[in-house]
């Protein structure tokens, strides 16, 4: 996760994270990526069921309820363990988490146990009553997925009317006083929609947006050919930086992040090195704190049936099941070879990743994407768009 507004527009300084000792239990949400202990943010896919049919869904969600979903009681035992383990944020996802009627009770319990509860949703089920309920239980944030304006979004979501229902969900959240943001998965068919998304942020006074690079997992594994080329990725990241800066310069700042391609960090730094060398030095310090991709370390995933994964995209490999063992034990058990290597994966990456001067900052990028394309978990991430010249001798990096 690369905070474009934090880094490029200077809304966060290295001293901001240092002030809290870089402990995840003390850091505000917007600084968690700079924690030193890397207690995992956990994504819990509480259900496989969904009311939409998104063509890039990593979870293969459908309209049926899986018979082995964790029950309410099992979920509460899970959250007891997560809280005791020091998990700072629990993100409820799916499928569509709001199809679970007990989602408010689950989220309320997470808050009661001292965790920050957030949900990732398509937004179409957020009525005014639902929004008020989520606000009353202390939900920290609602991330609503949009993949473009109406025609493009509804094509990706597989259901006509999804866009308008999502907009109403956003309005309902804002009316209830819940922080709400957008989630946008970039590909060849919707990259041109990005300026419209920025306009929507401004028009609807939405404070946050996350732009996700495509990860080849679930139904998204069929979209490899729809991913941006390296040159297109560079232009898109430049566009996001330009539009973010434009909002800030006009006194309408938004929190803008890119997710799932840690090449964005070095790329942003190299641009700043040309534009503002002093700020570039501060950004380099923040990127070192961030440490790049943290699958299997600073982020983890629990499926609806209790299986534990390195992240939400790595569903084909399970480290164990929380029905049999607590998450805290599974997450710290290094007898699993993959878990052990993911804790320090920089030792195991190959090819240009192994000789890259940005390795300590990128963390080897997305291993699951490398595996999807090459069959080798430790091969270079094919979505890294940095040139050989850029990775050979990074300026300022030692």
Image (tube, helix red, strand yellow):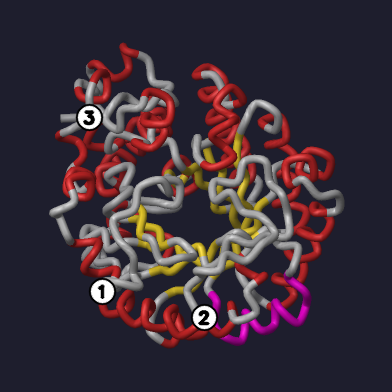
Give the mark nearer the N terminus: 2 vs 1: 1
Task: Residue under label 3, please give it.
Answer: 349
Q: Nearer the viewer, residue 49 or 114?
A: 49
Q: Is residue 90 above or below residue 6?
A: below
Residue 197 screen position, x and y as percent: 71, 44
Q: Residues within 10 Å of mark 3 (few under 14, many from 20)?
A: many
Q: Nearer the viewer, residue 343 or 178?
A: 343
Q: Secondary structure at mark 1?
A: helix
Q: Nearer the viewer, residue 123 or 336?
A: 336
- Where residue 150 sits, quadrant-wise, is top right
Residue 131 screen position, x and y as percent: 70, 77
Which residue is at 57% across, 20% downward?
Answer: 232
Q: Secondary structure at mark 3?
A: loop
Q: Which mark is residue 106?
A: 2
Instruction: Let me know if residue 168 is in the magenta part.
Output: no
Q: CA distance from mark 3 to mark 2?
A: 38 Å
Whether tag 2 and tag 1 are in contact, CB under 8 A, the answer is no
Task: Residue under label 1, please give it.
Answer: 85
Q: CA distance from mark 2 to mark 1?
A: 18 Å
Instruction: Let me know if residue 132 is in the magenta part.
Output: yes
Q: Residues within 10 Å of mark 1 (few under 14, many from 20)?
A: some
Magenta segment, which residues?
Answer: 126-139
């Amino acid at each position: 996760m690369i905070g474009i507004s934090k880094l490029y527009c200077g809304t966060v300084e290295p001293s901001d994270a240092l002030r809290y000792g870089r402990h995840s239990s003390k850091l505000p949400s917007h600084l968690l990526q700079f924690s030193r202990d890397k207690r995992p943010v956990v994504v819990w896919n509480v259900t496989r069921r969904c009311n939409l049919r998104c063509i890039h869904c990593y979870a293969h969600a459908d309209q049926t309820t899986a018979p082995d979903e964790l029950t309410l009681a099992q979920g509460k035992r899970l959250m007891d363990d997560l809280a005791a383990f020091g998990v700072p944020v629990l993100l409820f996802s799916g499928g569509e988490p709001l199809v679970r009627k007990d989602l408010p009770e689950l989220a309320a319990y997470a808050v009661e146990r001292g965790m920050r509860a957030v949900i990732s949703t398509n937004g179409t089920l957020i009525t005014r009553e639902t929004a008020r309920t989520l606000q009353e239980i202390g939900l920290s944030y609602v991330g609503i997925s949009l993949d473009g304006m109406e025609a493009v979004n509804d094509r990706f979501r597989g259901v006509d009317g999804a866009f308008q229902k999502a907009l109403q969900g956003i309005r309902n959240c804002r009316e209830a006083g819940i922080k709400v943001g957008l989630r946008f998965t970039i590909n060849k068919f919707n990259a041109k929609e990005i300026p419209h998304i920025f306009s929507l942020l401004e028009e609807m006074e939405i404070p946050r947006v996350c732009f996700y690079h495509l990860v080849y997992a679930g139904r998204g594994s069929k979209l490899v050919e729809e991913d941006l080329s390296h040159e297109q990725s560079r232009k898109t990241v430049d566009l996001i930086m330009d539009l973010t800066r434009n909002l800030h310069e006009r006194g309408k700042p938004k929190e803008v992040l890119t997710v799932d391609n840690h090449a964005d960090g070095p790329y942003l730094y190299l641009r700043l090195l040309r534009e503002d060398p002093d700020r570039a030095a501060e950004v380099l310090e923040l990127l070192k704190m961030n440490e790049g991709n943290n699958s299997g370390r600073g982020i983890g995933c629990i499926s609806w049936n209790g299986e534990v994964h390195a992240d939400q995209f790595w569903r084909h490999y399970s480290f164990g099941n929380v029905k049999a063992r607590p998450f805290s034990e599974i997450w710290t058990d290094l007898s699993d070879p993959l878990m052990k290597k993911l804790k320090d994966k920089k030792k195991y990456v190959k090819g240009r990743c192994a000789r890259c001067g940005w390795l300590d900052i990128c963390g080897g990028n997305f291993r699951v994407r490398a595996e999807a394309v090459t069959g080798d978990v430790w091969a270079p991430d094919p979505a890294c768009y940095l040139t050989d010249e850029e990775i050979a001798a990074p300026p300022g990096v030692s």
